[in-house]
């Protein structure tokens, strides 16, 4: 959850395909996710509840992300060009 602290707003570089899972795991660890993350796969209701919560959290913190990266080269460049 440290990455979503206001002190880091506009400074995150995240891999698009893992940002959702990383946020979900962080929310679970902080006790804020409606159901345990792994329980998302037990029922459609739990999956929807967790995914809706994670999606809303990420939308609320969109300003924290400076850029998404997709390949190894883009990831390295994102960290080399950090302010």
Image (spheres, helix red, strand yellow):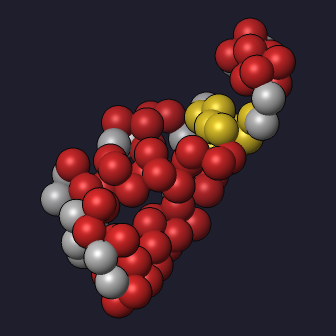
Q: Is residue 32 or residue 48 the one in the foreground?
A: 48
User: Is residue 18 depicted above or below 28 in this figure?
Assistant: above
- The location of residue 13, given as percent across then percent down, is 65, 33
- The location of residue 72, given as percent across then percent down, is 76, 21
The C terminus sits in image quarter: top right
User: Is residue 12 depicted above or below 36 in this figure?
Assistant: above
Q: Is residue 73 or residue 79 the one in the foreground?
A: 73
Residue at left offset 65%, top offset 38%:
15
Q: Please give left or right for residue 52 compared with residue 39 in the image.
A: right
Residue at left offset 45%, top offset 45%:
22
Residue 76 falls in which quadrant of the image?
top right
Residue most extreme to the bottom: 45
Q: Please give left or right for residue 10 compared with residue 37 in the image.
A: right
Q: Is residue 26 or residue 64 the one in the foreground?
A: 26
User: Is residue 67 depicted above or below 32 in this figure?
Assistant: above
Residue at left offset 40%, top offset 86%:
44
Q: Please give left or right for residue 6 compared with residue 35 in the image.
A: right
Can residue 13 be seen by looking at this rendering? yes
Residue most extreme to the top: 80
Residue at left offset 29%, top offset 60%:
38
Residue most extreme to the left: 31
Tally of numbered discs: 0
The N terminus sits in image quarter: top left
- The location of residue 71, given as percent across then percent down, is 79, 29
Can residue 78 be seen by looking at this rendering? no
């Amino acid at each position: 959850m440290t990455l979503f602290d206001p002190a880091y707003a506009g400074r995150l570089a995240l891999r698009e395909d893992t940002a959702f899972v990383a946020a979900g795991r962080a929310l679970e660890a902080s006790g804020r996710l409606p159901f345990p993350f792994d329980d998302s796969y037990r029922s459609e209701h739990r999956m929807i509840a967790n995914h809706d919560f994670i999606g809303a959290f990420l939308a609320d913190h969109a300003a924290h992300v400076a850029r998404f990266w997709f390949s190894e080269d883009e990831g390295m460049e994102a960290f080399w060009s950090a302010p």
